């Protein structure tokens, strides 16, 4: 099977491996005789048990859930300086909840943001913040429900790599990066608005 | 008005190509219904009761005669010969074929029009005062600011998929006709004490299920920061707005949950990192856009022959209700009423559209405005042309002298077209227009807004109508709930429900009773809404429901 990864405008092989935590045990409570599953907003973060139980291969380039990374970062120093360790976060995770605990995010060669649903536009603000506010310079990757028709916006929000959803054609998705030639407003890829770049008189 | 350069035109053309491809992939089954949904919505395409509905953007309500003529052609070629002007200054076509939509968009692009972001969870069409640039009470012309916001918000990558739709309105007059307080962001432009253009920013207003008026988040924002400040607001909303429950996803819910102080703190913190950033506006850009909205060539020499028509009662009635004072002496703005009882409120036939386009060419510098009250406006008509214009417009049934009166009803498409409706709304509007067809009586009743929505989504703005009618569903049949005391403008308020709902047949009689109560109780020169505020709901309830038994 050909690669699903688009990076810097072409399809390339993916040498990163996304590490998944084990499933959380869902707390089941009884309420007024009915069994209901308790979830607040449907967006739980990892439990400490999940973090502990996540298994990590001894070699290769790994994208770790950010919480797992934070938990192990002291033991991973060698691999980090070998450029073998990246992180992935979900769209509901606040950047501020981890950013200060990482010595220098530019020591991470790859940060991936995972979106459960393509229509979850938080990923765009996260990309923007990582690039503009936190000055992240390396590979910024969109993973999860990543589809052609959002790529242009993802690119403009600072993402330079896109792992297209398995059932879609990455070659087709590539076309989505160039839907428009000159957008109006400044964003991440082009910080100046059009009227500051070209003469519109 | 604003004219496209090659950049605008390329973007709009590229959008048509993009959408054409998306539709083809959908029809090919490469895109699922769920994947296609936000794409079609952000191009104004709803799937409705009978057919798709296509909503075309009319940025801040401004149209050229060529554009209106094109809309007429589209209505004939792809629809059933009419269009519906909406409360957000857009136009909707109710009967296009799905396969035709790219062709329609391609045709629209030839006259600098599109359907971009007219629906979906993104920044929608920017709205403003229908009398912008011509009203004597104007402080700052909001149109060029609206155009700057339009460009910035079009395909803004960070805000392409918000938790919910996002509406921005701008006003620059002392009297707010854009209902800025009922918008996600409302911008009130004024001149501050240093004689600088400044903006009062409202946030978190909206109608719908949970009507809330906006809160002031900033009293005095410099115009330079208009876009970066909006970016900060939108970023906080994008990250923290609820996405788990569509009915709690509007920014108003977030602002309410956090409280305006906390919300403002978050916004200010974000803003600190982007203030003075690249999207900061400068005076060169302001002046570039402003130049598009410069004054037309008003003539100064004219003979005032209005007086010779003062014996024509129909004309004088129309003059009184349908023309508005103008900043230039010898000029008036004219509202062409789309509220005769022969058509659904806001509907115009292709024949009417062409007639209005031609009137605009003859009498108003080729421009037309759409108001959120769903009427069409010729903004710059010389007084000595009024009689001629009136005679021509009358033939096309565009001169019902009811602007601002009871029968100038704001009404959503309701159960006749909309699949979300609880009840029909157009027939209710018609039955009310039918029983109040005596113009003298209507003029005697005076200024009053009656707004109708077919469900709690409130497309017909019923919450802010002096009289509001809301379609509700009771065990599968259609009922109507009545609210009184809503208001728009500077003294915006949300109406209160008067009691149990009514059937369709009862509705006109109920309205009659409400009006009778007002007429019985009013002081001389007291308008309906002031009378309601003074005497409260009780006398109206008594008239409608009968006197309550005194409890023992
Ligand atoms: C026929 C198809 C239509 C559909 C399916 C539709 C759908 C909706 C929905 C779901 C809402 C509530 C959104 C929310 O509260 O978050 C809404 C609100 C609204 N719609 Fe529509 N609508 C339609 C037509 C119209 C028309 C014809 C107009 C203008 C006459 C209009 C103007 C508005 C306005 C002004 C609001 C209230 C905005 C607010 O809550 O701030 N819509 N619409
Ligand atoms: S108010 Fe309800 S019935 Fe009327 S158009 Fe909106 S969604 Fe449809």
Image (spheres, rainbow, N blue to C red):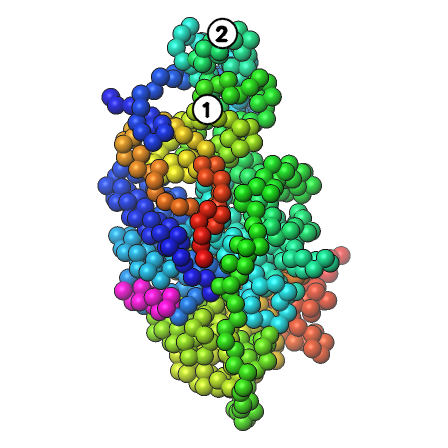
Tell me if residue B410 can be seen.
no
Closest to the observer: B10 or B479? B10
Query: Where does label 2 land, which residue?
Result: A78
Q: Position of residue B458 (x, y in %)?
A: 52, 55
Q: Residue at x 53, y 57 (%)?
A: B146
Counting residues from the start of the chain, the first of labels 1 and 2 encountered is: 2
Does dot 2 land on a helix, a strand or a loop?
helix
**Residue identified by numbered label 1:** A138
Residue that lies at the very extreme toward the right in this rendered image: B552
At which x and y percent is residue B528? Answer: 65, 71
| Rendering quarter of residue A163 | top left
Q: Which quarter of the image is occupied by the C terminus of chain A? A: bottom left
Say few, some or many: other residues with alpha carbon within 10 Å of mark 1 (under 14 / 14 to 19 / 20 or more): some
The span picked out in magenta is: B66-77
Q: Position of residue B128 (x, y in %)?
A: 54, 60
On whether residue B249 falls in the magenta region, the answer is: no
Residue B115 coordinates in the image, percent (x, y): 39, 54
Q: Main secondary structure of the magenta part?
A: helix
For disc 2, does the CB lie below 8 Å from ligand 1?
no
Q: Decide: few, some or many residues near mark 2? Use Cα within 10 Å; few <14, some 14-19, many ≥20.
A: few
| Residue B307 visible from this viewpoint | yes
**CA distance separating discs 1 and 2:** 19 Å
Please give the name of the residue rendered at 70% of the width and 65% of the height, measured from the top-left corner.
Answer: B533
Residue shown at the point (41%, 58%) measured from the top left: B4
Task: Check chain identity for marks 1 and 2: say if they share one.
Answer: yes
Asked if residue B76 lies in the magenta stretch, the reply is yes
Is B342 above or below relative to B469? below
Closer-to-camera residue (B487/A156): A156
Q: Is mark 1 within 8 Å of ligand 1?
A: no
Query: Taking B529 as reference, is A135 above or below it?
Result: above
Q: Is residue A11 above or below residue B59?
A: above
């Amino acid at each position: 099977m050909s690669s699903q990864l688009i990076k810097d405008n072409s399809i390339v092989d993916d040498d990163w491996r996304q590490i998944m935590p084990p499933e959380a045990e869902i707390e089941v409570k009884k309420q007024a005789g009915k069994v209901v599953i308790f979830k607040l907003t449907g967006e739980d973060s990892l439990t400490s048990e999940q973090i502990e139980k996540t298994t990590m291969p001894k070699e290769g380039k790994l994208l770790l859930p950010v919480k797992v990374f934070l938990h192990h970062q002291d033991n991973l120093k060698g691999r980090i300086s070998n450029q073998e360790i990246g992180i992935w976060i979900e769209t509901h995770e606040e950047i501020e909840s981890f950013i200060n605990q990482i010595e220098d995010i530019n020591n991470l060669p790859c940060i991936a943001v995972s979106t459960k649903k393509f229509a979850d536009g938080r990923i765009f603000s996260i990309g923007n913040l990582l690039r503009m506010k936190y000055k992240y310079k390396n590979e910024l990757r969109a993973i999860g429900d990543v589809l052609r028709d959002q790529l242009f916006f993802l690119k403009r929000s600072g993402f330079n790599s896109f792992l297209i959803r398995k059932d879609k054609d990455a070659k087709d998705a590539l076309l989505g990066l160039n839907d428009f030639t000159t957008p109006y407003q400044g964003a991440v890829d082009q910080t100046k608005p059009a009227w500051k770049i070209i003469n519109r008189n | 008005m604003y004219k496209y350069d090659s950049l605008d035109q390329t973007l709009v053309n590229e959008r048509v190509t993009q959408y054409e491809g998306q539709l083809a992939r959908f029809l090919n089954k490469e895109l699922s219904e769920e994947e296609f949904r936000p794409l079609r919505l952000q191009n104004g395409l709803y799937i409705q009761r009978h057919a798709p509905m296509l909503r075309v953007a009319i940025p801040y309500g401004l149209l050229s005669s060529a554009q209106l003529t094109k809309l007429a052609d589209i209505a004939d070629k792809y629809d059933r010969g009419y269009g519906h002007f909406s409360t957000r200054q857009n136009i909707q076509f109710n009967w296009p074929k799905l396969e035709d939509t790219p062709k329609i968009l391609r045709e629209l692009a030839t006259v600098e029009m599109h359907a971009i972001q007219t629906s979906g969870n993104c920044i929608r069409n920017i709205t403003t005062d229908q009398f912008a640039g011509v009203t004597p009470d104007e402080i700052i012309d909001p149109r060029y600011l609206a155009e700057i916001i339009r460009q910035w918000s079009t395909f803004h990558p960070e805000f392409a998929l918000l938790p919910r739709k996002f509406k921005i309105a701008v006003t620059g007059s002392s009297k707010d006709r854009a209902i800025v307080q009922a918008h996600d962001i409302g911008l009130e432009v004024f001149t501050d004490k240093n004689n600088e253009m400044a903006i009062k920013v409202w946030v978190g207003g909206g109608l719908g299920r949970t009507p809330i008026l906006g809160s002031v988040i900033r009293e005095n924002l410099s115009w330079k920061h208009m876009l970066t400040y909006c970016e900060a607001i939108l970023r906080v909303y994008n990250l923290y707005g609820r996405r788990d429950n569509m009915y709690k996803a509007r920014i108003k819910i977030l602002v309410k949950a956090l409280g305006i102080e906390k919300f403002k703190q978050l916004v200010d913190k974000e803003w600190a990192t982007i203030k003075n950033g690249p999207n900061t506006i400068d005076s060169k850009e302001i002046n570039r856009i402003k130049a598009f909205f410069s004054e037309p060539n008003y003539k100064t020499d004219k003979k005032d022959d209005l007086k010779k028509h003062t014996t024509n009662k129909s004309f004088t009635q129309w003059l009184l209700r349908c023309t508005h004072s103008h900043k230039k002496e010898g000029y008036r703005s004219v509202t062409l009423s789309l509220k005769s009882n022969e058509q659904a409120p806001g509907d115009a036939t292709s024949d009417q559209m062409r007639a209005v386009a031609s009137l605009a060419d003859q009498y108003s510098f080729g421009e037309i405005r759409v108001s959120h009250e769903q009427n069409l406006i010729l903004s710059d008509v010389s007084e000595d042309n009024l009689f001629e214009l009136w005679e021509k417009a009358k033939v096309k049934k565009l001169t019902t002298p009811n602007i601002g009166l009871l029968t100038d009803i704001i009404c959503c498409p309701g159960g006749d077209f909309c699949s979300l409706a609880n009840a029909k709304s157009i027939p209710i509007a018609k039955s009310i227009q039918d029983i109040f067809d005596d113009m003298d009586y209507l003029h005697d009743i005076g200024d009053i807004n009656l707004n109708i929505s077919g469900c709690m989504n409130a497309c017909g703005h019923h919450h802010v109508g002096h009289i509001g009618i809301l379609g509700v569903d009771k065990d599968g049949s259609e009922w109507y709930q009545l609210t009184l005391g809503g208001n728009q403008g500077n003294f915006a308020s949300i109406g209160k429900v008067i009691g149990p709902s009514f059937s369709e047949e009862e509705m006109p009689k109920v309205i009659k009773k409400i009006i009778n109560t007002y007429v019985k109780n009013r002081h001389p020169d007291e308008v309906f809404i002031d009378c309601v505020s003074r005497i409260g709901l009780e006398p109206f309830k008594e008239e409608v429901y009968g006197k309550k038994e005194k409890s023992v």
